[in-house]
Image (spheres, rainbow, N blue to C red):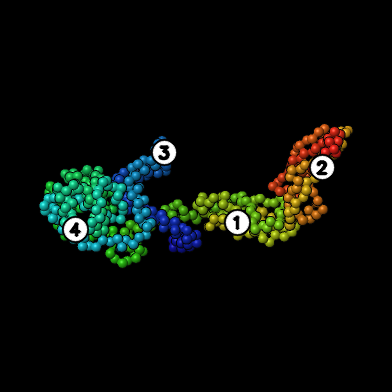
Amino acid sequence: MMDQLVIFLTDFLEKIRIADLFDIAIIGVLIYSVILWFKETASRSILIGFLLLMGLYAVSRVFDLYMTVMLFHAFFAVLLVMLVVVFQEDIRRFFERIAILGTFTDRRKARPNYPSIDVLVESVTDLATRKVGALVVLKGEEPLERHYNGGIPLYGRVSKPLLDSIFDPYSAGHDGAVIIEGERISKFGAHLPLSQNLAAISHRGTRHSAALGISECTDALAVVVSEEKGTFGIAEGGRFQVLDSAAALKSRLERFYVERFPKDTSTFWERVLKKNTGTKIVALLLATAMWFLLAYETEVVRRVFTAPIEYRNLSQEWLIEEPKPANAQVTLSGPTRVFDLMDPNELIISLDLTSIREGIQEITIDESEVKTPTNLTIQSIDPHVIFLEAHKIRQVELPVEVMLKGKLKKNLSIGRIIVTPPKLKVTGRIAALEGVTSVKTHPVNLNDISGTVSFQGQLIIPEHIRAEQGLSKVDITIEILTPEDEAKTKTTPAS
């Protein structure tokens, strides 16, 4: 048993990559976020129902329950839309939290001073004693703006006289909520979303429903005072609790600010390791188990791919003669999971032709010249050696010469021969260009011509020479003169 364990651990340490550790860490963070969301979301009962359905589907697949599987396949067609509709608010809140984490702000700088808590506790207890209804929302890290309607901007420092004046029964904004950000009241008279949790808000008023509603969709804390009973309580995380003393209220407010905006000077990593340690361990264990089930493989497979050959660092003064090898067979070995993630189009053999020389030569394809994904091993390359014929080339400009054959009809003569373009740029071997003074056309048969004609003539490109832009034809105009035309030409005075 111990020997097998040692063999397993040895094989595991040999095959695991740094990328695999990052893979496990990323999945662990996602699982951790889902667990926290599962704890906090108001739709968790519906989520449990979806998870049970997924479990039933898995059992159906295992036992080959054909009709059940087919029914689930039809259901999955609309499952994604259903999830988005049911959990749209939770999904939006999840992305808002990601945006908050992405700002990398120092949370300690946003921590309000505690004297404002004392002011708030004093005001709330006094309002409760006088049975004056009130609703105060303390902003956490998540934005509140999209969750409430209306509200009058104030930006005044929190004070008892200010709160008393706002919640005065004769004040226009006393029925709304006060939004506190830091040490200031940002708005008053705001209308909050009402909770749909009928069990929690039974026998309670609209203020309590609004306090619970804002706590369900944000990380804010709401303090509510009942004008009927003269009691006060708090709503946080979708739960409502009536408090029996000012000390209890102060303790809960201080705990709220400590959790949302810690006083301590611990580093980011210390807070990461200390907070929700048990949940993080569970998430990491689940991510590791998923990696072993889905990604870890002890079996190595081999697959053959056709890889194109590209030629790089070839100077313009060199020409590779055709045919040249266009691809090669590459045999790779590695885990199946790596092959599943691999894009075969990215497998390329890139040959460096910096050291090319004149004539026929053999080039060995080195493994370093094959672009392969990490964790895959090259077993063979076929062909391992290719042959190329290279020659130095140069570019010259040559006139186009129209070749003629046959004879014109009696009394006809050739006036001008116009070629467009009159010259061509050609590229070819230095040896092949020696002695070449022009680019000729296929012979034009004069027996078939009785007057001036225009046509396209086919070029005769010598072997190992290429015309610019692959040009193979030119425009030709042959001017034919009659005796009358010649007489006019002779009698016309020179300009």
Quarter of the view holding residue 199: top left
Residue 7 visible somewhere in the drawing: no
- The amino acid on which the numbered mark 3 sits, given as a three-letter code, is Ala
Query: Which one is in front in this view, the residue at disc 4 or the one at disc 3?
Result: 4
Residue bearing mark 1: 370
Question: Mark on residue 494?
Answer: 2
Closer to the camera, 97 or 158? 158
How many C-alpha atoms fall within 10 Å of the one at disc 3: few (<14), some, or many (≥20)?
A: few
> Mark 2: which secondary structure?
loop
Assign the N terminus to one quadrant of the image.
bottom left
The mark that comes first in sequence, 3 or 1, is 3
Query: Which one is in front in this view, the residue at disc 2 or the one at disc 4?
Result: 2
- For the residues labelled 1 and 2, the Cα–Cα distance comes to 72 Å
Residue bearing mark 4: 159
- For the residues labelled 1 and 4, the Cα–Cα distance comes to 72 Å
- For the residues labelled 2 and 4, the Cα–Cα distance comes to 109 Å
Horizontal arrangement in the rendering, residue 477 relative to residue 32 (left or right): right
- The amino acid on which the numbered mark 2 sits, given as a three-letter code, is Ala
The mark that comes first in sequence, 2 or 4, is 4
> Mark 1: which secondary structure?
strand
